[in-house]
Amino acid sequence: MPSRLAPPVPDDFVLARDACSYGYFLLRPNHWDPKRRVLTRVLHLPGGPATLRITQAGDPDADGAPAPWPRVAGNPLRIAVNRTLARPERAGAIAQVTRMLRLDEPASTLAAFHALDPRWADTGRGRLFRSPTMFEDVVKTVTSCNVQWPSTITMNRRLCEVVGASGAFPTPAKLARTRPATLRARCRCGYRDQRIVDLARLFAPRGKRPPEIDPAWFEDPGTSDEQVWDALVALPGIGPYAAANIMQLLGRFGRLPLDTESVRHGRSVLGFEGTDKAVMRRVGAHFEPFGTHKFRSYWFELWKFYEAKRGRADTWDRETVGATFTASQLE
DNA sequence: GGTAGACCTGGACGC
DNA sequence: GCGTCCAGGTCTACC
């Protein structure tokens, strides 16, 4: 018999806004249905994979104009699971959904962000979608480096189809046992093949010993940003851009993952001129006043630009609009 | 410390 | 249909 879950939901939470807030919501195994307004994905649980179907009460199941955000803020989430979950599995599923949707982001943190950058106070934007595990966020970040968005989509789709069980994202243990040649030939990961396997080996248990990487250490507020940064750039395939991006996924928003997209934004939206390097420096300096929230300010500016081109993110279809985000198409 | 070139894939383009 | 060029971040070798 299918299970139902009801995690605690903060008063300001809006599923359509907060799930469709970062590009990873368009990557497998995530699927947002813009018509039915349902977030679906497979999670790994102790009893095997389980498919979750997440909706928010009050969000209209219609293909008309999306509901204004305030109408559903704080309404309960309805999570239908395709099989019965044992008690520990229910707790595990809720923990993963909580991480993904940042349901435990304190209201005080978002209020501090809105006080610093009031541009996003009206819409309530502040949460950023992420994966149920740090490992998935790290691999997704590696698959987004040195490729255009359609290739990132392909790599994640094929990782789930070829290596993941039942369409789920591969576990560290499974990826650690996968041959690099398989990732290259069947998942189109290219030269990232060995790096992804090496990363998986660091996240996977080593026999009876725990994994070399402890995600809890990276997420612990007692660990400084500098310590996290140093540990991240020491990982295979992780450079300055990837490390800064993983930091925001870990909830540390004080660094910017500067890339060619930052340069495009600097030129076309902020009006900066000069060499790429100079524009990148100016973009970094521009967001300096936002301190520990600078990534949120930067990212929602970019997101606003994308939404001006393609419509509100919760109306994007993964296979069509969601696959078109390349710099040349956004000029 | 800074820089050049290799690493892959997929798409655009010319023939 | 084929070959060439280009975009994209990380890594290594070299100055």
Image (tube, coloured by chain):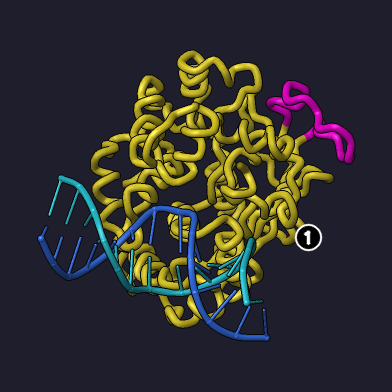
Chain colours: A yellow, B cyan, C blue
Confirm whether the magenta stretch covers residue A62.
yes
Q: Which residue is mark 1?
A: A1
Residue range corresponding to the magenta coloring: A57-75
Compared to A27, does A269 lie above or below?
Answer: above
Q: Nearer the viewer, residue B5 or A12?
A: B5
Horizontal side, residue A208 vs residue A91: left or right: left
Q: Is residue A246 visible?
A: yes
Q: Chain of mark 1?
A: A
Please tell me which residue lies in front, A119 or A71. A119
The three-letter amino acid code for the residue at tag 1 is Met
Q: Is residue A36 left or right of residue A164?
A: right
Quadrant in the picture for residue A330: top right
Give me the residue at 72% from left, 33% from top.
Answer: A76
Q: Vertically, is A151 above or below A133? A: below
What residue is rendered at 42% in x and 68% in y?
A: A192
Q: Is residue A58 left or right of residue C7?
A: right
Of A273 and A299, nearer the camera is: A273
Quarter occupied by residue A179: bottom left
**Tally of numbered discs:** 1
Quarter assignment of residue A301: top right
Image location (x, y in percent) of residue A20: 65, 40
Between A116 and C2, the residue placed more toward the observer is C2
Residue A33 magenta: no
Image quarter where the N terminus of chain A lies is bottom right
Within 10 angstroms of label 1, few (less than 14), some, or many (20 or more) residues? few
Give x and y (percent) for residue A14: 68, 31
Picture residue at 89% right of the left edge, 35% below the top:
A64
Main secondary structure along the magenta-highlighted residues: loop
